[in-house]
Image: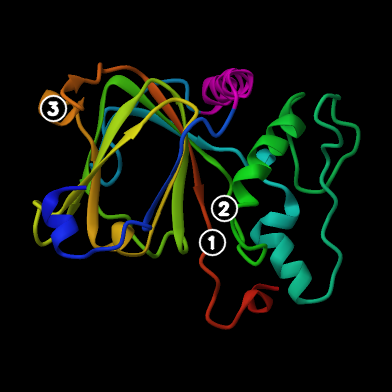
């Protein structure tokens, strides 16, 4: 936290950081399966995002990693008194046995991955509905430019599970860049941002060496994958209104 952030008396709990949230073997399993999904759904790196905020990246969403009960569909079903469609993946170390309407591809390790990601969702109230996990693969030469997330795209929290290389994420107040927070995102760590940090601060991961340092040491540029989590924005009329 910058000295001005502290002197302004801003809260420190708008960013949550959990180092070593997953084990090395869980990290390797996630990397392997993220790369499989990316190879099938986003095989090449893109030089520019539609909103010009990300350079040299590729991304995709993975609906198979989101249990039905945690998604929008499960919350709508509960709101109208219908049973939630059972998930097609049974145990974490077996091939999928069941089938479910709306599912097209179920990977061998999708059940095991869900058990890992369940630990993320369990940090939050069960009333939260989640969007499918989103894989963001940032090339060694890629960068995320300063921006504030559009609040219309998701709900209260945005976070990521960090894979492969480390990075420094910088948050700056939209009205005063001296009010800032730098966060070292190491592999296997989990972070979340909410409240003021999400809506009143830009965030970025830059190629600028001056901003890629931590405790006086430069953080080397390297490829990184972030498995992103976003809760869904509940309609004003409630989930029942989507039935």
Q: Position of residue 79 (x, y in %)?
A: 74, 75
* Position of 69 relative to 94 (above/below): below
Residue for point 60% across, 38% down? 62
Residue 131: which disc?
Answer: 2
Q: Is residue 68 visible?
A: yes
Residue 24 shown left or right of residue 51 in the figure: right
Q: Is residue 106 visible?
A: no
Viewer-nearest of labels 3 and 2?
3
In the rendered image, which residue does mark 3 sit on?
208
In the image, is residue 169 part of the stretch drawn in magenta? no
Label 1 Cα crowd, 10 Å radius (few <14 / some 14-19 / many 20+): some
Tell me whether circle 3 and circle 2 mark residues in contact (CB < 8 Å): no
Local secondary structure at mark 2: loop
Label 3 Cα crowd, 10 Å radius (few <14 / some 14-19 / many 20+): few
* Position of 199 relative to 32 (above/below): below
* Position of 8 relative to 165 (above/below): below
Tell me whether circle 1 and circle 2 mark residues in contact (CB < 8 Å): yes
Q: Position of residue 48 (x, y in %)?
A: 26, 34
Q: Quadrant of residue 140?
A: top left
In the image, is residue 28 part of the stretch drawn in magenta? yes
Residue 1: which disc?
Answer: none
Residue 205 shown left or right of residue 109 in the figure: left
């Amino acid at each position: 936290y910058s000295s001005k952030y502290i002197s302004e008396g801003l809260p420190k709990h708008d960013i949550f950081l959990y180092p070593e949230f997953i084990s090395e073997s869980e990290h390797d399993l996630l990397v392997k399966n993220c790369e499989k999904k990316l190879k099938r759904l986003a095989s090449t790196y893109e030089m520019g995002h539609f909103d010009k905020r990300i350079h040299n990246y590729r991304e995709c969403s993975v609906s198979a990693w989101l249990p039905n009960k945690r998604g929008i569909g499960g919350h709508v079903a509960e709101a109208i008194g219908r049973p939630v469609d059972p998930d097609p993946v049974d145990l974490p170390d077996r091939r999928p046995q069941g089938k479910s309407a709306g599912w097209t591809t179920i990977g061998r390790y999708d059940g095991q991955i869900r058990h890992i990601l369940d630990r993320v969702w369990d940090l939050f109230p069960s009333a939260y509905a989640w969007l499918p996990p989103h894989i963001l693969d940032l090339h060694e030469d890629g960068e995320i430019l300063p921006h504030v997330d559009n609040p219309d795209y998701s709900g209260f929290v945005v976070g990521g599970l960090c894979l492969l290389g480390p990075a420094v994420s910088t948050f700056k107040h939209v009205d005063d860049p001296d009010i800032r927070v730098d966060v070292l995102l190491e592999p296997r760590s989990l972070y979340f941002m909410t409240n003021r940090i999400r809506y009143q601060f830009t965030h970025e991961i830059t190629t600028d060496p001056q901003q890629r340092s931590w405790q006086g040491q430069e953080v080397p540029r390297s490829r990184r994958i972030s498995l992103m989590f976003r809760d869904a924005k509940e309609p004003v009329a409630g989930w029942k209104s989507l039935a």
